Image (cartoon, helix red, strand yellow):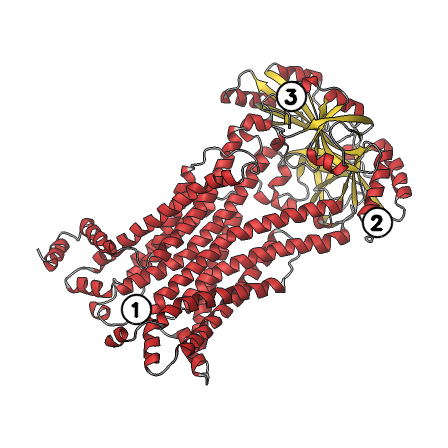
Amino acid sequence: MNMRAKIAEDRRSGEGPGLALRFALRELRGGLRGFYVFLACIAIGVAAIAGVRSLAGAISGGIAAEGRTILGGDAAIVLIQQRPDPQTIEYLKTFGETAEAVTLRAMARRQDGDAQALVEVKAVDPVYPLYGELAGPEGAIDMRQAGETEIWADPVLLDRLQVEAGDSILIGEANYRIAGTIDNEPDLLSEGMIFGPRVLMTQAALARAGLLQPGSLFRSAWMLRLDDASDAGVRKFAETARARFAEAGWRVRTRDRAAPALSRNIERFSQFLTLVGLAALVVGGVGVANAVRAFIDGKRPVIATLKSLGASSGFIFRVYLIQILLLALVGIAIGLVAGALLPLAAASALRGLLPVEPGLLLQPNALATGAAFGLLTAYAFAAWPLAATRSTPASTLFRASSLASSVWPDAKILVSIALALALMCVLAVAGAGNRYIAAIFIGAFAASFVALRVTAFAVQRLAAMAPKPRRTGLRLAVANLHRPGSLTPATILSLGLGVSLIVALSMIDSSLRRQIADNVPKQAPDIFFLDIPKSQFEDFRVALETVAPGGTIVGVPMLRGRIAELKSIKAEDYPAEEGGAWVLRGDRGITYSADLPANSTLATGTWWPADYSGEPLVSFAAEEAGELRLSIGDRITVNVLGRPVTARIANLRHVEWESLGINFVMVFSPNALAGAPHSFLATWTGDKATGAAEDGRILREITAKFPSVAAVRVRDALVVVNDLIGKLGTAIRTASAVALIASALVLAGAIAAGNRARNHDAVVMKTLGATRPFLLGAFAAEFSLLGLVTGLFALAAGGIAAWFVVRQIMGLQFHFDPALGAAAILVALAVTLGLGLTGTWRMLGAKSAPVLREL
């Protein structure tokens, strides 16, 4: 049966999918030539999404698998500034074996007083740890054998104090011998952020230091090895403890949520990188469209022949759609393999640096998500150029010109493309913890996409309307910007998105650094003094004025409290948005004051009188109140030292958090916390010309007189923060370079796809006497103009995005960095010019005869 008869018969039978599949497979025998960029674009995006989500899932799985070790027990109760009463302790012991760990900050001092350092003291029971192993360089550390004068320390402390194991140091009012160093502390991750090296000792040893006084800031964690350690037993204990001690002020934690803060941070970083991977995939979608358009353009004779033999437009569309989807599956498979290998490579390369050993490294859900994004991208960007064949008559296909790119698909194809894009957005937003940020990212990306298309159209129109340059090479370059099949849309669209993302992230990083480096030191105090006993505060103030005359001292009462209810709704049930949810997690620092605190201004409401004695009132930070939907008159209940304190919001105030001064989300009227034991927090601000040596002298003299007081130098904290921001910024920019790589691939594919028409022009011009240097100069001018326009757009779009994030989301000052702007333009120029000239060099050496025969 000949082909005409076969097609006619198949048309009568409805041109079933079987024939379309056979035609598609037959044409694929010709290989993958022309589709390498297509495959690379799909594979890179899928690998980024699947790999990042797999690694995050593996780390989260490791946290879950090691939950009881990380937490230190099957369950734990945590209290701030208090310890359970004897009856409560006896009640806890009815569920299983218990162990207490008390943590607090203190100053460790060398015997000669020449060096001191802030340390995180941890005092434990002899049975500690209930799970896992506490170990040093020489093996396990047995706390049952520890003496009252012995401590174990982080090696960092020995380095800071320039001491060795066996030496003695001072902590609080007692002298301790360093028995050894700590290599592994099994429950370290459950404690969140710590600000100094660890010092481990027994409960009896802590009693000698005199650090625990009424109002002292400390954390008491009671860990349990439950007799019924099943999941049901753990849930039963948690429910019983919360119900029986609803007003105790403790947090009940279980092994399935051993390190919630770490899990949240891993999830957030994973979501960000997933969005970056999605950006790379969408940028790659432009490459998919270019590759499909070039592929269909090369199939003109085949399509024309099939139409002449009676094949319907729908049949031809199905044939080539099947081919594209089969090729997309190949790219997706490559990306999934790379994504599945990423956790394996990371687990090996980062061994010892990851917070836990990753759990199950193969994450089916992550791979499925990457595959779904890849398939939807392939269809959404391939369907439009494929649909051009449906509305193009066979007579047009037989001509030498390319397919008419201006032909719009029919309504069904447009609806299917819109559905594919909508599904991608739904997947991205639904899988994000902060859906607001994800929606903003997608909206900004879509707006950039539209703006780039408008920019490309504007460039083409301006090039067409511009006066003709006198120089022939420049005239050719300008004409190439707007001629049919121009590279202008593909170049501006693909490269503009990638460079815009890099610009935005770099400027956010630069603004954060400037905020810390320039603004904070001008306002921030030099030293924070923590845990000053209430009874010693006036003596402390006099001593500090004597040791450091001329400085400014600010001191406020300091307590810890946990929000229990807002507007009669329990905190754990309160519908808080992500921005303000941090206020409800864990314990917050609180204070009381008769006057409006410094670094604050009233937003709404009035401040209470200095002699106020009515119902308890509270002042709430305005930004956080807005995020929690709180207003004046609302009531909140805060558990302070196991006692619920209910207060009415009297006013909202703007807080200058960036000043690094003493600031609180909640400031109570003095009568609300009358009689509650507390300590004081103080800052000292001296002449900004004073250096680290002067700060060190002040610390030595003050901590020698007040051994229980801990101190933090702000300049040291800023170094740590700057280093953290630097590492985070480098990691984010490196990850975002995936989008730039995808952009470069798309541009390379677009140049390759346009070489057919460009080769035709070059041959004609060489026949008319043009030299290779002349053509290279003309093409270089064209690519330089494209790179300059793309760089300027990326600078504007990336700068606007960075401004929005810094000003509207972070609430900080935005700083435009001219060097970053120049770098963005240079990157766009270098990539466009380099890829453009590389792609056209070989074309200029092609023989003229084959092209001239087709004229």
Question: In this figure, which residue is indicated by the disc labeled 2?
Answer: 686
Picture disc at residue 725: none
* Residue beneath the point at 84% across and 46% down: 694
Question: In this figure, which residue is indicated by the disc labeled 3?
Answer: 128
> Which marked residue is nearer to the observer: mark 3 or mark 1?
3
Picture disc at residue 404: 1
Residue 380: tell me if it is visible.
yes
Task: Give the distance between the C-alpha atoms of the residues marked 2 and 3, in whole angstroms.
Answer: 44 Å
First-in-chain label (2 vs 3): 3
Q: Residue furthest left?
A: 1
Question: Which residue type does callout 3 highlight?
Answer: Tyr
Secondary structure under badge 3?
Answer: loop
- Depicted 381 relative to depicted 624: above or below: below
Question: Which residue type does callout 2 highlight?
Answer: Gly
Q: Position of residue 754 (x, y in %)?
A: 35, 68
Question: Which residue type does callout 1 highlight?
Answer: Ala
Instruction: Tell me whether the residue at label 2 lies in contact with that at label 3, contact meaning CB atoms closer than 8 angstroms.
Output: no
Secondary structure under badge 1?
Answer: loop
